[in-house]
Amino acid sequence: MNENHTLEHLMKKADVRSYDCYQCGKCSGGCPMAEGMDLGPRGIMRSAQIGALDSILNSSTIWLCSGCYACVDRCPHDVNVPAFIEEARYEAMRRGIVRRDSEVLNRTFLANIRAFGRSHEMLLAAFYNIFALKPTQDLTSLPHMISKKLIPIKPDPIRGVGDVQAIIARAERLDKLVKEVRE
Amino acid sequence: MLRYAYFPGCASESTAKSTTLANEFVFGAVGIDLVEIEDWCCCGATSAHTLSETVGLALPARALSRAERDHPDLDVVTGCASCYARLKLANYKVRTDKDAAWLVEKALGRPYTAKNEVLNFLDILSLDEVKASIETAILRKFKDLKVACYYGCLNIRPAEVTGAKDRENPMAMDEIAVLTGAVPVDWGFKTECCGAAHQNDAARQTRPLTARILENAMAAGADVILTACPMCQLNLEMRQTEYARKREEKKTGKKVFPLLDMVIKPEPQETIPVLSLTELLAIAMGAGGRRLSLDVHHVPVGGVIAQGLSGMNEKEVREAFI
Amino acid sequence: MSKVGVFVCHCGTNIAAAVDVVRACEAAKSMPGVVHAAEYKYMCSEPGQQMILDAIKEYGLKRIVIASCSPRMHETTFRKMLKKSGVNEYLIEIANIREQVAWVHDDKEKATEKAIDLIRMAVAKVCRDEPLKSQMIPITKRALVIGGGIAGIQAALDIADAGHEVTLVEREPSIGGRMVMLDKTFPTLDCSACISTPKMVDVSAHPNIRLLAYSEVAKVEGYIGNFTVTIRQKARYVNHDICTGCGACSEKCPAKVPSAFNKGLSKRPAIYTLFPQAVPAKPVIDKDSCIKLKSGKCGVCEKICPLGCINYEDEDMEFTEDFGAIVTATGYQTADWAQMYDEYGAGRFPDVIDGLTFERLVNASGPTEGHIVRPSDGTEPKTISIIKCVGSRDPKKGRAYCSRACCMYAAKHARQIFGKIEGVRVFIFYIDVRTPGKGYEEFYDKTREDGAIYVRGRVSRIYKEGDTLICQAEDSLLGKQVRVKSDLVILETAMEPAEGSASVAGMLGAAVDGDGWLTEAHPKLRPVETQVGGVFLAGVCQGPKDIPDTVSQASAAAAKVIGLLNKNEMESSPMIASVEADKCSGCSACEAICPYKAITMGEQPGREAGGNSKKVMRPIAVVNAGLCQGCGACTVACRTGAIDLLGYRNRQILEEVDALWV
């Protein structure tokens, strides 16, 4: 599949048509994360219009989108940018393009669920800070959290933790299957 | 009696301690039976769906399918906006997208038909009959307590999934808050994303938008921010000292070092307490501060509550806050 | 045999590129009845027509088939040509091989086959065509103009100046429409009232114009040249025959309601004139806010009026008038943005106003005497943001179309602000700047020179930070988010068809498009006519436009009306329903189905049923040639097959269909 086909496929999957966008900027204007993004939602659609899949997949925007859907809600042409960003993110991961901090967080998070069936913020933050090399991030809140017993130091897994692991494994296999079918 | 299958969400066991206590108190007082879904697991928000579409749908579907199996007549309710968004989306996708439904069923290894609804606390508390029960259950009212109702983005959007009509200036929470005598303020960030999802992996980009929400609530004259989600709750109150110090730094030009602050423990002027809606209701319904563990809040809430309940005698005030 | 001639047009390359015209022509030669076939580059041109006329003479052609564009385009052209040749002008058929073939198909081979099929069908039908003769119908030499805005005023004055009588109907208590609400007009910045009020006075003083303000059209019957219109004069509760417009009543009236004319920025009494320069300059009582009419108490105006004009018993009055032509000039309203845009505050912020409200604010005769102040606290704004395309270019929340005037309107507002507030900052948020008009781009240049800061980006939301409004948008040229603190925000809202214009269109039988604008007969060649004969369009009721375009179109509509009214009688189409008396059972099914009320039940002598051969009068359908539009609905309803449509008889249609199976 060549780049243009891939781009078209991603847009089709997200039910987005790049020609619908007339670049008014209402999306980027209201995006809460826009100031930290490189392309922003409007830039994502602009890149899609000129076929620059590469710049979409390598952007920070696809990792920083918080999925609040304010952009599509206000879009005059109902362009579902977050849906397209999600598809672009999956494609980036298929190609091994990742944003380090996001990757560390997401992998730590999923490992957490695999281990306990539930998420434990303390462990998540601790492991994230270690692997992302940010030992002091949010350290100031730690004394309060511990003194008020807001975070259980020793988490217990749920009974169905094996079931959860099996579901995640099957879902990941299905993802691969879907990708193969498409190709 | 209203009954719902209840999805508590991971935060309920840890950081949202006081909110969980308040939830139990309020739903008990208004006579709503929340039946916890047996052995529920994390919905995956927000990392699971970032990594994989199918994992992102299968995790919430696991809890939903268990609810459907054990309580075929009950709708599912949750008190967390992130969980709500994932559960609601899984429910919506299974209903509307055949491919997604097939993937979910294959991943789960058991059926999920999505015949029941997924609701959030606001949906339930807004029901007329529930509002009437709330009014009866309220024992003491706040006076001149100005509240900024923060709905969070995910309780509201995307519209086609949540069905929310007013996404810019919703009023459901404001209308519940007034029952306690609180006065909702008109402010601009009711549904603006607080950035909770990226506080770990994109702290630099996210913190300004959290700070902006707090500043707008303060500018609108609010005494307290009310939340409808433990994620928003934690995110809005957790780093307030840091934000306030940043503002001071901007004003005075004196450099601030957060780690040093841990030792010198400055008292910043501009913070705003954050309470969950159910905490506010529970207090109005007579729950004491100790009972609700209100001391767990990062920004102390006692002062605001005492001020709001200024009709009470000294003993009651002491009971009300710590 | 019928002696048919077939002429295939290339339409330049419009047809020839997609259809093998030579092959189609050859195929036509062997069709039954065809004695001659030819093709040519432009059949409608002078040499093309001459070629047909020559062929008629040379081959003695009796019937003609032309394979070309849609009959809507040139059927009349070819009929006129035939008239010259002596062949009856209804013995012609057009095979539409442009719109129905060349423009919609890619495969030349198959397109050619389809073109040949269409020609074969046309040949089959033309062989069955009968000579028809049109009738002459008289014309009432009076015109009705609906709507007293600048379009209606201009049309009425032009028609009246040409010597024809005009009745101008306006539903508000005064004519003037939207234009008199404006302060200044672009691109000249001349005072709107100064150029429109003299025209209003001209209307009231013109001997050929009858002005009916505070009136509405209630019913329209008839057809081109012969309309009968019922007009409802709303109860005014003031005798305008003796009222001098002294204004004493308005001054003393104790009831106060928000003035719609001033967009709610001020209040008006219940007995009021729309504005000081109103025409007619006489008050009416708004029955919904009058204390006397609502509760029976008060009566102050009656006591104060020196001439005894007040009549609380007044009622709506209906009367009919005959007209030969009707001009619709029902205009527009601005979109109700508060219902559409929650992200702009949905009307919660008093200092977010629409452009028309700003016009009243900046207008010297407005409620603030032209001082630009914030509606919330009366202070002078130091930073003003203007947002364009609110409700326009927004298929999700508003209208898909561009409202055309707002870019200039926004620039004009900026210029007006600079003229009135020293040191003010003006931000204009835009998606595109569209200035196609004489002197318009130069006006835009001057606006930037004056200091307006254009920001390319549609504002995402407006929120309040303390007392300040913040417009949050992306400066899409920099790719940076901007938050502009503004004391006042002006929304340039979309134009929408005026409320009630659809019902006016319905009464007239004129079509409206998906957005509610009245549809012109042809977007390029018949822009001021509707598909309904005798009904013309002026101004914004046909689509958004600015004042220069509105006035031009009004004069164009007036020219069409004058052309019609200058004739004493006109030809009617002979392609109408015709009843075969012997077959008609008098069931009146056709009468019920006819949308034009063209069929009535008459009587004819006959014999009573049951075989006793007693002579009686029995009912029979009668068609009014003037009213019948030839739609054919009756022919389907007729159970005995007694009604046929001349030119489209069932036999002719069947012949056409049969030709497909050759």
Image: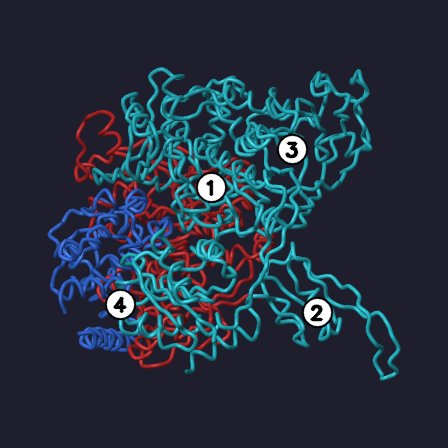
Chain colours: A blue, B red, C cyan
Q: Distance between the Cα atoms at labels 3 and 1?
A: 88 Å
Checking the image for residue B53, the label placed there is: 4
Which marked residue is nearer to the observer: mark 3 or mark 1? 3
Badge 3 is on which residue? C165
Badge 1 is on which residue? B318
Q: Distance between the Cα atoms at labels 3 and 4?
A: 73 Å
Relative to residue C161, is residue A79 depicted above or below? below
Relative to residue B120, is residue A61 depicted above or below? above
Q: Distance between the Cα atoms at labels 3 and 2?
A: 39 Å
Q: What amino acid type should be assigned to the residue bearing mark 2?
A: Ala
Checking the image for residue C589, the label placed there is: 2
For the residue pair C530 and A142, the one nearer the viewer reads as C530
Q: Secondary structure at mark 2?
A: helix
Q: Position of residue A152 (x, y in %)?
A: 28, 60
Q: Which residue is drawn at the image coordinates 39% and 72% (left, top)?
A: C35
Which marked residue is nearer to the observer: mark 1 or mark 4? 4
Mark found first going from the N terminus, 1 or 4? 4
Q: Quadrant of the C terminus of chain C?
A: bottom left
Q: Distance between the Cα atoms at labels 1 and 4?
A: 50 Å
Mark found first going from the N terminus, 3 or 2? 3
Q: Is residue B97 left or right of residue C623?
A: left
Q: Secondary structure at mark 1?
A: helix
Q: Are marks 2 and 1 on the same chain?
A: no
For label 2, count other residues whose C-alpha is less than 10 Å away and answer few (under 14), some (14-19) or many (20+). some
Q: Secondary structure at mark 4?
A: helix
Q: Are marks 3 and 1 on the same chain?
A: no
3 and 4 marks in contact (CB < 8 Å): no
Residue C603 shows in this picture: yes
For the residue pair C134 and C239, the one nearer the viewer reads as C134
Q: Which residue is drawn at the image coordinates 35% and 20% (left, top)?
A: C424
Q: Are marks 3 and 4 on the same chain?
A: no
For mark 2, name the chain.
C
